[in-house]
């Protein structure tokens, strides 16, 4: 299937508690990046350090309806601070967020009514931040968004440092909330705006600015904006180089993130260099478990470089440390088993590969206390990819379905679920269950649209796969619409010469042919052949297939090809001696759909 990659779920951070922001603080709560123990693949949404649903005995409920008669006690200027303190104390005492919500709502109303006309109230901002945090803890993220948007409008940055801090805190908290809703693009916009405000208040070299840069870089990695993430990570390294000791923990964290970015961009040597430096820093600080996590990442790089013996050595080092420090049934141990299974599969040792898969599954199926659903789902998804490659689609499908079931009630996992549904659709398609495949693709498309992913290359690939399923079900008109949308996205994101874009061109031409729109099909095929002749070379086996299809259509239409002279250098493919017809893209006979 063109361009559809295995979706892997990055390790998640522990579920955060309710975070009550403070106007006096320039930093928002952050977690160390938990993205360094697995190979980079299709990045998926992370769990930011924003409030998560509480496990309190109180169930989420709507606040009581407002009384038609306003409470006169709210006009007391001393009531707002008192109610806000009660809200904080209620949360700290573990009484649950439902009661705290009532206090926070009344506090915000009191601050609003007692505010001096024309004077922005930072007390009101604080109460709104706390109110939004409680909404998030109840899983009511949609209600938190307007509260935070209102909180952002209150401060006036020209009034001084405290107002700027309040605005920064509001933007970061709003970004976290959007991230929990799966709206990654809007989340990044909020983080970027918060960073601008923070730089204006503290300057570009403040170490707290460095922390925010790294936080934003992590979000951009999840959104596959690797170039932007790399720029921010370099800036973070420069800031920490000035303000931190050599080989500091901060620098190690920066280098691990930079290694992930380099690996995602295919620059494995640079990634390896950053990981070695990070490992040295962790060793100097006595962080044995972190060193083991870095060894796992180093093994991933060696695996990508096909340096298998070195990869095995790194994986075994990590495995020894994890077993001794965390126990033999810890998910970290399972993650190493998955990597070893993939390595042995690549080297053709299928018995060893299957054995490691079974060892990992044994851990994931009976998780130790404290293992998160996201960790288990990520591991099952990775193992399913291995089963898929060894022609065990039914077993792979079972694992994917278990992964989706684990994540279906988790906030902020819409993108992850959409990715799993897309992979499920591909596998259903390959075993001939086309109706189920179309439904799975459709569900993924709906989620990706809702999450703001409608312009990503991955979204374009999913549309193309859904279009192929529709063709198999003889829903030709629907397939044409999907291919057209996929073409517009992939042309913008990947360019017309990318293999995924060429695949969509071919599928769209075949669909137009099936619909009787011969002229449109001819136009597309002439364009594709022109691209191959002038830019890509004609030795690719697909060229002859497309040329033959075009000749048939032209003959049917009674036309000759509109062909321009080709430059000699583009007629030669330096790799032509290494290519065979067998290596060409599979096609459906007669119609020319590319699978």
Image: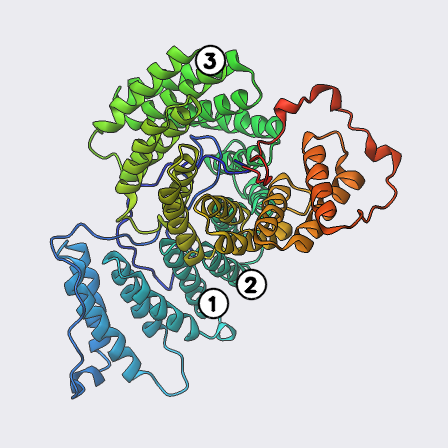
Q: Is 331 drawn above or below residue 58 in the view shown?
A: above
Q: Within the image, what quadrant is residue 148 found in?
A: bottom left
Q: Within the image, what quadrant is residue 114 found in?
A: bottom left
CA gap between label 1 and label 2 equals 8 Å
Are the residues tagged 1 and 2 within 8 Å (C-beta)? yes
Instruction: Determine which of the numbered discs, if any, sits on residue 164 in the image.
Output: 1
Does residue 79 appear left or right of residue 586 in this picture?
A: left
Sequence order check, earlier mark of 1 and 2: 1
Residue 401: x percent and y percent? 30, 37
Does residue 295 appear left or right of residue 570 in this picture?
A: left
At a point 36% along the width and 77% down the height, the residue shown is: 121
Q: Callout 3: helix, strand or loop? A: helix
Residue 266: x percent and y percent? 60, 32
Is residue 30 visible to us here? no
Q: Tell me the crowding category of disc 3: few under 14, some 14 to 19, or many 20 or more residues within 10 angstroms, Cα based.
A: some
CA gap between label 1 and label 3 equals 50 Å
Q: Identify the residue position indicated by label 2 in the image.
A: 200
At a point 33% along the width and 14% down the height, the residue shown is: 355
Does residue 333 appear left or right of residue 565 in this picture?
A: left
Does residue 153 appear left or right of residue 105 in this picture?
A: right
CA gap between label 3 and label 2 equals 48 Å
Sequence order check, earlier mark of 1 and 3: 1
Q: Callout 1: helix, strand or loop? A: helix
Q: Callout 2: helix, strand or loop? A: helix
Residue 295: x percent and y percent? 45, 22
Q: Identify the residue position indicated by label 3 in the image.
A: 313
Are the residues tagged 3 and 2 within 8 Å (C-beta)? no
Of the two numbered discs 3 and 2 in the rendering, the one whose residue sits closer to the viewer: 3
């Amino acid at each position: 299937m063109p361009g559809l990659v295995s979706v892997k779920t990055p390790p998640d951070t522990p579920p955060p508690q309710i975070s009550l922001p403070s106007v006096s603080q320039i930093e928002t709560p952050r977690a160390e990046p938990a993205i360094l123990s697995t190979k980079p693949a299709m990045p998926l949404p992370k769990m930011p350090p924003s409030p998560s649903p509480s496990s309190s005995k109180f169930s989420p409920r709507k606040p009581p309806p407002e009384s038609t008669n306003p409470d006169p006690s709210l006009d007391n200027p001393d009531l707002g601070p008192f109610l806000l303190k009660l809200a904080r104390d209620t949360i700290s005492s573990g009484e649950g967020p439902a009661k705290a919500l009532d206090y926070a709502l009344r506090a915000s109303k009191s601050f609003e009514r007692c505010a001096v006309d024309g004077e922005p109230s930072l007390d009101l901002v604080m109460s709104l931040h706390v109110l939004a945090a409680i909404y998030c803890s109840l899983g009511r993220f949609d209600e938190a968004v307007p509260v935070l948007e209102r909180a952002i409008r209150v401060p006036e940055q020209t009034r001084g440092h405290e107002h700027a801090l309040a605005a920064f805190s509001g933007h970061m908290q709003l970004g976290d909330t959007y991230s929990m809703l799966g709206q990654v693009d809007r989340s990044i916009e909020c983080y970027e705006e918060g960073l601008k405000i923070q730089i204006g208040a503290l300057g570009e070299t403040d170490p707290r600015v460095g922390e925010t840069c790294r936080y934003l870089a992590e979000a951009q990695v999840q959104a596959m904006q690797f170039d932007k993430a790399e720029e921010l990570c370099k800036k973070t390294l420069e800031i920490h180089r000035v303000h931190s000791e050599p080989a500091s923990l901060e620098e190690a964290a920066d280098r691990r993130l930079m290694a992930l970015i380099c690996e995602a961009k295919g620059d494995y040597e640079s990634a390896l260099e950053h990981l070695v430096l990070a490992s040295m820093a962790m060793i100097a600080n006595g962080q044995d478990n972190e060193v083991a996590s870095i060894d796992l990442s180093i093994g991933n790089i060696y695996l990508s470089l096909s340096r298998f013996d070195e990869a095995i050595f790194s994986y075994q080092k990590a495995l020894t440390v994890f077993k001794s420090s965390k126990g033999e049934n810890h998910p970290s141990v399972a993650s190493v088993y998955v990597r070893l299974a993939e390595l042995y599969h690549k080297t053709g040792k299928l018995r060893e590969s299957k054995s490691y898969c079974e060892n990992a599954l044994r851990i994931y199926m009976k998780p130790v206390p404290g293992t998160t659903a996201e960790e288990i789902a990520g591991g099952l998804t990775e193992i399913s990819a291995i089963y898929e490659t060894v022609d065990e689609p039914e077993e792979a499908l079972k694992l994917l379905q278990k992964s989706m079931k684990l994540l279906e009630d988790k906030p902020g996992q819409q993108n992850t679920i959409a990715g799993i549904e897309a992979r499920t659709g591909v596998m259903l398609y390959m075993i001939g269950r086309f109706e189920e495949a179309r439904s799975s693709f459709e569900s993924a498309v709906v989620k990706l649209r809702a999450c703001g992913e409608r312009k990503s290359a991955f979204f374009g690939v999913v549309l193309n796969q859904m279009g192929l399923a529709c063709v198999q079900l003889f829903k030709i008109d629907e397939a044409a619409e999907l291919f057209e949308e996929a073409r517009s996205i992939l042309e913008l994101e990947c360019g017309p010469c990318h293999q995924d874009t060429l695949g969509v061109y071919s599928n769209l031409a075949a669909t137009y042919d099936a619909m009787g729109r011969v002229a449109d099909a001819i136009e597309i095929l002439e364009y594709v052949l022109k691209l191959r002749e002038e830019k890509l070379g004609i030795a690719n086996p697909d060229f002859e297939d497309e040329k033959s299809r075009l000749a048939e259509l032209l003959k049917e239409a009674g036309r000759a090809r509109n062909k321009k002279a080709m430059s000699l250098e583009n007629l030669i493919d330096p790799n032509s001696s290494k290519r065979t017809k067998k290596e060409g893209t599979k096609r459906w006979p007669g119609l020319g759909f590319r699978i």
